[in-house]
Every structure is written in C-alpha cells, then in structure tokens.
Amino acid sequence: MKSSAPGKIILFGEHAVVYNRPALAVPVNQVQVDVEVADSDKPGVWIDAPMVELHGELSTLPDDHPIASVILKVLPSLPASLPQREAHPVEGISITITSTIPVAAGLGSGAAVSVALIRALSSFFDLALTNEQINQLVFESEKLHHGTPSGIDNTVITYNMPVFYIKHKPVETFKCGKPFTIVIGDTGVSAPTKESVGDVRRLWLHNENRFEEIFNEIAQISTMARRFIETGHPEHLGELMDQNQEFLKQMTVSSPELDVLIYAARRAGALGAKLSGGGRGGNMIALVNQASAESVAAALFSAGAKRTFITEIK
C-alpha cells in the first residue's frame, strides 16, 4: 500500500499559535513524503528511510524514535486476529519512506512522515482511519518531539488544505479568492522547533504582559491576512508579512541567515517576506508577483539559500 503527504508552510502566526492565537497555514505539494507498506519475507517490521539514514527492525528502535513512535501508536488499533509477538503484534512487513521535504526546515517533514505512514498502515491493515483519527494520532506523536506543539503541522498536512487554526478550536478551512505566489528559501540550517518553542515560553514566563501584547498583535495580523486572502487581495499580505517578521525578531526566533534571505528577497522585488515555522534557521517565505518569482528565487540563491521552492497558493 502506498500513501503520500504534502509539506506545509505557515503564512502567519507561528509561535503565537501555541498561545491560542490564530495562524494561517497552507500545504506545499511541491514537496512530499511517500510511504509504501508491503509484505516481507523476514519476520518483524523492517523500516527503510534513507533521508534519516534509518535501515532496521522496529523492535531495535527506542519507543520515542520519531518513526517508531508513530508505528507503535497505530499497532494497538490493528485487528486482534493478526499474528502476535512479544515486541509488537505484526510479523513480516516492510515500510519504505522517501521524502523530498528538508528535515527540520519548517516544512512539516515530521508530521508529513507521520501522516503518510499512518495512512499507509491504515490501508494495509484495512483500518479505515478517519482524518480526525489520523490527525489526533499525529498530534500525539508531535508532542514527543516538539514539547508543546501548536497542532498546526498535523492539521494542515492531514487535511491537505489551507487552514485558519486556533488551538483547541475546530479547524476552519478557507478558500483563496485569488491565487498568489510564494517563494520559499531554505537557509540549510537545521532548526528543531522544540528548542525555539521552549525559548519563547521562557521569555513569556519572564515578561508575560509584553509577550501577550505581541501575541495579540500577531493575532490581528493573521485575521487580516485571512480576510485579504478570502476577498482576493493577496497583494496586501506583503506588508503584513513584514510586520509579523518584526514581532518574530522580538521573540528572538529569527537568525542572521534568515535575516539575510529576507532582506535579499525584499531587495529583489518581493512584496514582503518573513520566516516560516519555528525559526532560528529553516525556511523563510516571500510574497511575489508571479512574473518575479524566478528572479527572487535567484536572489535567494545568491544570498546563500541552499534551495528554493516556488509554490502557488490557490
């Protein structure tokens, strides 16, 4: 059985979303994870994931391993009639995971692997898991690796559509009144979300009033951005991106590498630019006119981007 899941980018509201403010996120289908589950002639559950240099049997991995934890969460749902084993109730399957999503770059690689893996296992064992069940399983796995995850990665990737997301509230999907183009620039710097989320939390605890004000400002930006997108005025998003970036810098989650790319994008004609995701590395995004997308991408390469993606949001 095969399954795929897209990457994602956050347009607005990262970090503030952890504190119950809205965020906007969209899937990026230019990058994706593919998972194939098949019968194996060897006993056990064999995993081949070249992008993380993993080639081994499930029982040899720690329970909190990113991939092992997802599989172990799905196994209790398997039919009781399957062959039993002390380590886990599955015999003789192989799982192959391939990905074009950079790891720890703010494109949701971990959640995408989890979604694709759960969907493939669900199909292989005829579990018929719903999107809601998949979303919850992935969110539980995200807790192991991000500490206090917002829930936005698993949600936008599971449903594969733009979302307006507020923690602990029903997911709201939204439609674009007019397509718009985003250029994504990868700094090449690995940036685990858990660390930046933890640092922001410590700053919030130290100066709660100031950071609540920052989160409120970002909430207004996210709400205005949704309105512009839905009414077909995405050209106004650039200024909002620049404003959001300034607040992210105050949270100390930008970095020299991100700042260089953001400046390069603006200088090359982008309508606005900001980091996307946890920060401290990973990706930045720039709103561009479609005609200038290639030149902005080239400017990002010249400024040190390791790779770029041009994606149309529609």
Image (cartoon, grey):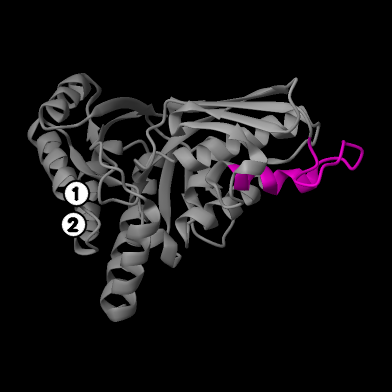
Residue appearing at x 16%, y 26% in the figure: 301
Answer above or below: position of 136 versus 185: below
Q: Mark 2 points at which residue?
A: 246
Residue appearing at x 42%, y 59% in the figure: 17
Viewer-side residue, 13 vs 88: 88
Whether residue 58 sits left or right of residue 167 in the image: it is right
Q: Callout 2: helix, strand or loop?
A: helix
Q: Quadrant of residue 160?
A: top right
Whether residue 286 sits left or right of residue 180 in the image: it is left
Answer above or below: position of 232 versus 87: above
Q: Name the residue under label 1.
A: 242
Q: Do the residues labelled 1 and 2 touch (CB within 8 Å)?
A: yes
User: Which amino acid, mark 2?
Assistant: Glu
Residue 63, horizontal then vertical, whole percent: 61, 51
User: Which amino acid, mark 1?
Assistant: Asp
Residue appearing at x 31%, y 55% in the figure: 221
Residue 8, horizontal then vertical, whole percent: 43, 38
Can residue 290 be seen from the camera position used here?
Answer: yes
Q: Is residue 287 magenta?
A: no
Can residue 21 be seen from the camera position used here?
Answer: no
Viewer-side residue, 77 vs 39: 39
Q: What's the CA distance linking mark 1 and mark 2? A: 7 Å
Residue 220, horizontal then vertical, whole percent: 33, 60
Answer above or below: position of 89 versus 51: below
Whether residue 220 sits left or right of residue 250 in the image: it is right
Please identify the quadrant where the C terminus is shown: top left
Q: Give the range drawn in magenta.
A: 68-90
* Residue found farthest to the right: 81
Residue 148, horizontal then vertical, whole percent: 47, 62
Please identify the quadrant where the N terminus is shown: top right
Q: Few, some or many C-alpha atoms within 10 Å of disc 2 (few <14, some 14-19, many ≥20)?
A: few
Answer above or below: position of 68 versus 290: below
